[in-house]
Image: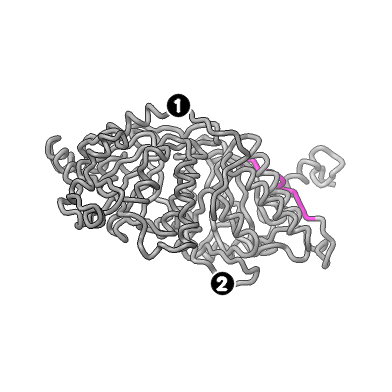
Amino acid sequence: MNPQNDTSTTAGKIADLQDRLAKSRQPAGEDAVRAVHNAGRLTARERVEALLDDGSFVEIDALARHRSKAFDLEKERPLTDGVVTGHGTIDGRPVCVFSQDATLFEGKIGETTGAKIIKVLELALKSGTPVIGFYEGAGARLKEGIIALDMYSRILRLQTQASGVIPQIAVVAGECRGVQVHGIAMSDVVISIDGQGSLSMDANPGGVVEAQETGTAHIVVPDESAAQDTVADVLTYLPSNNRAIAPATEPVNTELANRRAEEGADAAALVHEINHLIPDSGSETYDVRDVLAAVLDEDSLLELSLGFAPNIITGFARLEGRAVGVIANQPTVKAGGIDIDSAEKVSYFIQLCDAFNVPLVSFVDAPGFLPEEADAPVIRRTAKLFHTTAAASVGKITVITRKATGAAYLALAAKRMGTDLVFAWPTAEVAVADADTFAAEIGADEASAQDPYEAAASGLVDAVLPPSETRQKLVEGLALLERKVEDGYPRKHSIVTF
């Protein structure tokens, strides 16, 4: 007998282990893997290995199998049970990861599958490392009955306990149905692969939610490779846990400065261009991305929820290498006014940045809340924005570029709402109401109703400064606020209106 076939010997035991591990790498067989590749997709294991640094993946529970005997399930007990789990590194940073395998049980969650995901979530919490989940599954494994739902309850509770403690990133890599879509929506950042990832609450096919348009997906990418790159990119802006700060990078100049330097423009020309980004006429629109390109580090802006509520931009960026969260009204869409969707978009983003110690920088040009949104249900839903703004204890700096009117001023620019530093450009219009309303009711001159110097005289604006000085003032302010400490009143938690 070949010693390698004799499991009573050491050599035989090692050979047996190697055989089992080899089967665990393709538990559904070569034909299933080929079908995945023919569809232009990666397998669950390939997604993990493509994401992590070469050779860093340490798999957990590769030899796990379900133990259910219901409906003859004991006749089908593939290794891994439909999910690949473990830990590794991304750019040298430790992370935990799980990846649903749709070639086994359609990626449905059963007792063993759930236990594996729970184990890796618990490991991420204990070690204070981010967790990334690749989702592709058809809901609960019905043949395992209520036990499958019990697994979901434990996963969702654990995700809730991990919320605000470690970053949770979800990649919607295929069709996702049933209860698991709630776990995806509870993640901090959701990345969906265009034309491939989909969400549906129904356990049956169909009823797919347009994740980008509804704000469920924060980033939509074209393919599997872009999904891996985007996960790594997101992590560069976030710390590993809520007790750390995001890693800094080497400072770089702004996009506008670099572009003009290549064209041979001198410093005076650049200053003049920055100082005239805002049109002379208050009714003339402009693209706030031009403002961001003049202030932020070049190529550092990573927008979230690009296709949802485009009247306000939210995203991560850098200022001289330091990670920041950016909020900016977009005058080209609804004049930058606030509606339900944009209020909820900003509320989520403020909570995300606050939880992970990412300072907030806001560029405000908002004429107020949109008139068509002024009804009772909307009042309740948009109140979240005031709540999250006031509750956030992370460093907050606001730049008022043009309009900061009424409730929009309170939500995005009010110093007494907890904003640490408020700067205004000379083009700013800071007022309790728009100029026409103010003049009609009070009889005052329109200009005086909006004058930023009145706000500065009252201490509600810390400085009125030319746009060309904004970047430096923000850098100095962020350095000042890096060790900000803000103690609140003792309580179990605040109550956010929904």
Q: Which numbered disc, 2 or 1, marks the residue that appears first in the sequence? A: 2
User: Residue placed at 69% from the left, 47% from the top?
Assistant: 118
Whether residue 459 is situated above or below residue 403 in the rendered picture: above
Using residue 50 as the reference point, say whether residue 6 is left or right of it.
right
Q: Mark 2 = which residue?
A: 207
User: Residue placed at 28% from the left, 47% from the top?
Assistant: 431
User: Residue placed at 44% from the left, 59% from the top?
Assistant: 340
Tag 2 near tag 1, CB within 8 Å? no
Give the CA separation, mark 2 to mark 1.
47 Å
In the image, 455 versus 143, the foreground residue is 455
Three-letter amino acid code at disc 2? Gly
- The reply to whether residue 239 is in sight is yes
In the image, 432 versus 238, the foreground residue is 432
Whether residue 286 is situated above or below residue 390 in the rendered picture: below
User: Residue placed at 85% from the left, 47% from the top?
Assistant: 1
Q: Magenta span covers which residues?
A: 56-66
Label 2: state its secondary structure: loop
Residue furthest to the right: 8
Residue 93 on the magenta span: no
Counting from the top left corner in percent of width and height, residue 251 is at 33, 32
Instruction: Find residue 483 and name its label.
Output: 1
The total number of labels drawn is: 2
Quarter of the image where the C terminus is located: bottom right
Using residue 325 as the reference point, say whether residue 92 is left or right of it.
right
- The reply to whether residue 229 is in sight is no
